[in-house]
Image (tube, helix red, strand yellow):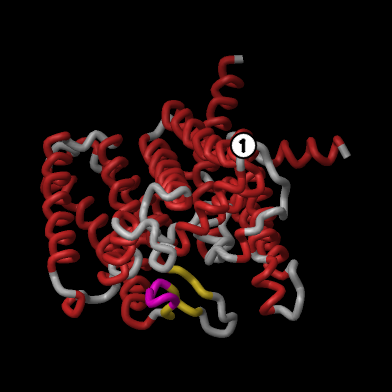
């Protein structure tokens, strides 16, 4: 048994601590999803309470396999893949906007023919944009202070998918935009240009908020009425049991959690909290594993971010550094926003907890993102080993 475990660990190259974080998050995912989806599975699958557990187990196995194969590829090849993915994501986002499958009044998904798999195009676009932006930053380092030749092309690459995603998934679009700005900051884009971008963003956000709260509801288009309702619910009707049912049920779950764990499967709020296995899975984790479990999950993401920063410092090439920091910040920012929503700090957003929430395409592209970060780490280790051999 020890030899088998040793063989497996030897094959898993790259940052071992990131691999450990991934495995622990998947374990939390399977335990929490099984607990949170038991009632739902019993209702829709003729009493098979483990139906969604096995789906999540298969997602976890598939995710780890994707990470494994993604980390074997030299990260330099992702530069070319990024260009193809970004170009492909634009028509897919356009198709989703007008012809995508609508769930909860949001057109975010495409149903793939024959297999019937629901595919969220923004997940692919998010990964493609961060990779492509890392490629552009690497290519334009010598002209990084020139607005027309470097900053403007990058802004176009960022704004096109962000605007298309924002129509039906504003929270994901905002996460992607701020992640892109952060990558540009790390990529030595002029502070003057970044300040102008910040000022323009504040103006656009101000106009958006004014139109959201000053226009009558009859003039609001798309999901603007939903966004307005969520903001008002969070800041004005927070204690109204009808308007803020989800948040109140999540707060009850957290209050029942206490400091010490209650044990896996001992959640009672899973029967009352909508999306307990997805958007609000962190509340179920706290109810079952207490404050200790909740803090431990936060620390896992922070450890992952720290290891990404170490990769950035050690990366010999700019592209690898930009990839690691971009993907790391994006995943951790998404996780922090999901957990902030669960504990009532932010309005409801619909953002999932990476690798923990139940999901299909989100697990696929999150696993690929982790795999690419591990690819950068693996190639750093290989290069260091070759240098040590040369010295010896």
Q: Which residue lies furthest to the front in this view?
A: 240
The N terminus sits in image quarter: top right
> Where is mark 1, residue-wise?
259
Q: In which quarter of the image is residue 96?
A: bottom left
Return the residue nearer the eye: 117 or 285.
285
Write the residue at 23% across / 42% down: 140
Front one among 99 and 269? 269
What span is in magenta? 103-108
Q: Can you give x and y, in whole percent of width and height, for residue 74 in the image?
A: 52, 44
Local crowd size for mark 1, using a 10 Å CA cut-off: few (<14), some (14–19), many (≥20): some
Q: Which residue is drawn at 14% across and 56% down?
A: 204
Q: Is residue 357 rendered magenta in the image?
A: no
Is residue 14 at least partly visible in the picture? no
Q: Is residue 184 above or below residue 346?
A: above
* Residue 390 locus on image (x, y percent): 57, 20
User: Is 380 situated left or right of 66 in this image?
Assistant: left
In the rendered view, does 245 fall on the left or right side of 67? Answer: left
Residue at (42%, 27%) from the top-left corner? 313
- Residue farthest right in this picture: 1
- Quadrant location of the C terminus? top right
At 30% from the left edge and 35% from the top edge, which residue is drawn? 186
Residue 268 visible from this viewpoint: yes
* Towards the viewer: 40 or 26: 40
Q: Is residue 71 above or below residue 242?
A: above
Q: Considering only vertical position in the picture, is 316 above or below 32?
A: above
- Judged from the image, the secondary structure of the residue bearing numbered disc 1 is loop
Q: Is residue 376 above or below residue 174?
A: above
Instruction: List x then y, in percent, for residue 198.
Output: 16, 44
């Amino acid at each position: 048994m020890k030899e088998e475990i040793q063989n497996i660990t030897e094959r898993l190259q790259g940052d071992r601590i990131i691999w450990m974080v991934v495995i622990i998050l998947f374990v939390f995912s399977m335990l929490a999803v099984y607990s949170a989806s038991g009632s739902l599975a019993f209702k829709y699958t003729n009493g098979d309470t483990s139906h969604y557990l096995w789906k999540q187990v298969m997602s976890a196995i598939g995710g780890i396999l994707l990470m494994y194969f993604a980390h074997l590829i030299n990260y330099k090849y992702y530069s070319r893949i990024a260009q193809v993915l970004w170009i492909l994501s634009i028509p897919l986002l356009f198709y989703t906007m007008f012809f995508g499958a609508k769930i909860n009044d949001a057109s975010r998904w495409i149903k793939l023919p024959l297999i019937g798999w629901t595919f969220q195009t923004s997940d692919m676009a998010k990964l493609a944009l961060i990779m492509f932006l890392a490629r552009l930053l690497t290519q334009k380092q010598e002209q990084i202070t020139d607005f027309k030749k470097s900053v403007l092309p990058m802004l176009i690459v960022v704004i096109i998918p962000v605007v298309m995603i924002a129509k039906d998934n504003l929270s994901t679009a905002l996460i992607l935009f701020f992640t892109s700005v952060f990558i540009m900051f790390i990529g030595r884009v002029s502070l003057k240009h970044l300040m102008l971008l910040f000022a323009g963003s504040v103006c656009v956000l101000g106009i958006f908020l004014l139109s959201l709260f000053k226009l009558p509801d009859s003039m609001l288009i798309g999901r603007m009425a939903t966004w307005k309702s969520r903001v008002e619910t969070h800041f004005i009707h927070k204690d109204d049991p009808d308007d803020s049912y989800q948040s109140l049920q999540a707060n009850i779950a957290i209050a029942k959690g206490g400091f010490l764990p209650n044990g896996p499967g001992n959640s009672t709020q899973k029967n009352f909290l909508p999306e307990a296995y997805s958007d609000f899975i962190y509340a179920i984790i706290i109810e079952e594993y207490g404050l200790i479990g909740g803090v431990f999950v936060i620390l896992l993401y922070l450890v992952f971010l720290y290891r990404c920063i170490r990769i950035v410092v050690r990366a010999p090439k700019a592209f690898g550094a930009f990839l690691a920091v971009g993907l790391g910040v994006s995943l951790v920012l998404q996780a922090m926003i999901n957990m902030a929503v669960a504990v009532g700090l932010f309005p409801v957003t619909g953002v999932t907890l990476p690798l923990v929430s139940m999901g299909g395409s989100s697990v696929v592209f999150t696993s690929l993102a982790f795999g690419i970060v591990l690819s950068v780490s693996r190639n750093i280790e290989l290069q260091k080993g070759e240098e040590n051999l040369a010295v010896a």
